[in-house]
Amino acid sequence: MRKDKKKRNKAGMFILLCVGAFIVSFAGSAIFKMNYTSPALKEYSVDWNDEIGTTYTDIAYGDGEANKFDLYVPADDTKETYGLVVYLHAGGFTTGDKSDDAGMLQWLASKGYVAAGINYTLRDDEHPEASVYSQSMDIKSSIPVVVEKAEELGYNLDSMAISGGSAGGTLAMLYAYRDADESPIPVKMLFEAVGPSSFYPEDWSPYGLDQNPEAAADLFSVMSGTEITVDMFGTEAYEEAIKPISAYRWVNENSVPTVAAYGVYDKVAPFDTVKHLIHALEENNVPHEYIEFPHSGHALQNDNDLYVKYMETVEEYLDTYMPIK
């Protein structure tokens, strides 16, 4: 009976997270679609056609049903090398699809990059074992296949950037900070928006986890894919158990330049989680640009001027750290 009750608690808390993430996903793939209506952001979208590039969809990188990626390649295939930009979709780790970010990926390819949108196994009724950790492992295993496929198509890759929004932002950070040393090509930069980089109960107050350690332990167990107990909070054992999915813990003096955007009123991926990330970047002297949206929540919807600044900064960092050759 107690075991069944614990399972119900886990499911209940995770549903709360999913509801918020679903609203954002439905409203616009965490962030970009909704803001593309702004005239100032029109330059970050393209009318995709064969003269700009080609799309290859549903390329397998593993045996799982979700282990697929889409590749967007520029029409100009005459260069010796290209940069790769990966963009990971949003959806609270439970929903979403690589196709949600077609506009972003097309824009990146129009600039001359090879762009990839990658799916990962979502936590749902069919995959109750999936976690943030297992999803990050999906992404890690996909990159060599993305590079290989691009080369098969005649696009030799020599560098990469990785990005994402919300859940995709978290997975992008984990690859950039935790796994970059094992990347088949050098990771040059990261840009992400509203991805949680830490998992402490006190920072997840919108879900009441600061007042309910049992619920916090249940939710973080689900997200980490390992058992978290209440008595672990505040101990070194907790720090080690949660480290595999805590992106900020992997930041060091060699971490890649970063552009990050967060909304002060974010209740989906709680705003308080960003302080650990920014502190780690500053403490390790990592080149970064942190753009805070003072009137916005998870969708960064109420600060259009700052959203333009975010996209301009992304482009500046791409031009600086991954210039088109």
Image (cartoon, rainbow, N blue to C red):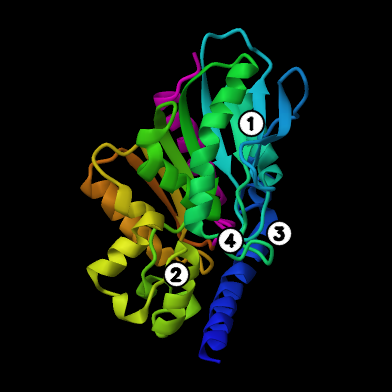
Residue marked by disc 1: 107
Return the x and y of residue 190 as percentages of the image width and height: 43, 39
Q: Residues within 10 Å of mark 1 (few under 14, many from 20)?
A: many
- Counting residues from the start of the chain, the first of labels 2 and 1 encountered is 1
Q: Which residue is mark 2?
A: 220
**Which quadrant of the view contains residue 177?**
top left
Q: Name the secondary structure under disc 4.
A: loop
What secondary structure is the magenta-colored segment mainly? helix
State which region is magenta.
298-325
The amino acid beneath tag 4 is Gly
Q: Nearer the viewer, mark 2 or mark 3?
A: 2
**Label 4, label 1: how far apart the Cα atoms are:** 24 Å
> Where does residue 113 sit, x and y in percent of width and height?
57, 24
Residue displayed at 65% across by 52% down? 29
The residue tagged 4 is 92
Q: Whole-percent x and y of residue 93?
A: 58, 59
Q: Secondary structure at mark 1?
A: helix
